[in-house]
Amino acid sequence: MGGTLPSRILVIDDDPFVRSVVQAALEGAGATLKICASGDEAITAVVAFRPSLVLLDFVMSGMDGRITWHALRARLNGASIALPAVIFLTAKRDMADEAAALGAIGVLAKPFNPATLVDELCRMLGNAPAGRTAPVNRLEGVSAEFQRSLPSTADAIESLWSDIRGRGWHHEAAEALRAKAHSLAGSAGLFGRHALGSVAEDAERLLLNALKLAHAPDGYELQKIGAVVAALITSCRQ
């Protein structure tokens, strides 16, 4: 590796395709990874793994990146283990100040370029670029798996929205729908599906705003959500 990347990297992201892309890129550069799908999983693993770098999704279901990072630091401090560097992965805009306040050395914006991920991380760490790209065959395999998943994802989104229209607005279906949109917003751009990612971002934003209301969305708000959900289903099936 030439010392360009830390040897032990903890990766925390709730999207399986983001995890697969990061794994393909970083293992190709020789790093040893611990891959976690949630903050809870990472907290359990961090002391034994002793990472020197944490790549942490900022917006996750359950424990978000902020809470997870505080919990990881507490676990490591309690075990008298040196704190690793942390880089946040996020599709949120203008997060640099918030990330810096949390002690992060940088923010990696989603969607990132899988082929240049290693060099981007090296630059954030102040190291010389590795000059390596992720193994093409592994990335192509992940991309193909993502494309194969889209019809069933569209079916699931359509079913959730039909449930809301049939039973009325309820938190469980709306949250499940938001989670589907969030996953697509974080991963679609990794595979060149930028239009899909953009529609998914719009759907997630509208659903998140509706879920924050103290009351069920009115007819106009539901119409707006329905339009963007329909566009999301169409984009998944294209």
Image (cartoon, rainbow, N blue to C red):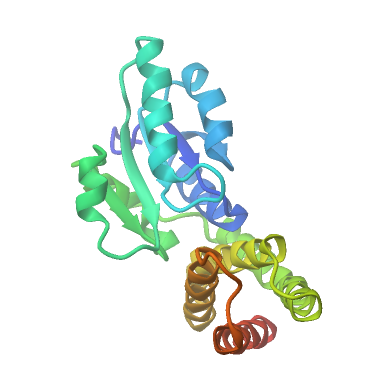
**Number of numbered labels in the structure image:** 0
On screen, residue 122 versus residue 235, left or right, reads: left
Q: Residue furthest front?
A: 215
Answer with the quarter of the image where residue 82 lies.
Answer: top left
Q: Is residue 126 above or below residue 111?
A: above
Q: Position of residue 15 (x, y in %)?
A: 58, 54
Figure quadrant of the N terminus:
top left
Figure quadrant of the C terminus:
bottom right
Q: Position of residue 128 (x, y in %)?
A: 21, 44
Q: Can residue 205 be seen at all in this image of the molecule?
A: yes
On screen, residue 74 versus residue 153, left or right, reads: left
Answer with the quarter of the image where residue 69 lies.
Answer: top left
Q: Can residue 31 be seen at all in this image of the molecule?
A: no
Q: Is residue 21 above or below residue 63?
A: below
Looking at this view, is 163 or 180 the one in front? 163
Looking at this view, is 208 or 70 the one in front? 208
Residue appearing at x 75%, y 72% in the figure: 160
Looking at this view, is 95 or 163 the one in front? 163
Residue appearing at x 53%, y 61% in the figure: 136
Q: Position of residue 57 (x, y in %)?
A: 44, 49
Q: Is residue 215 above or below residue 48?
A: below
Residue appearing at x 62%, y 82% in the figure: 229
Q: Position of residue 31 (x, y in %)?
A: 44, 35
Answer with the quarter of the image where residue 172 lies.
Answer: bottom right
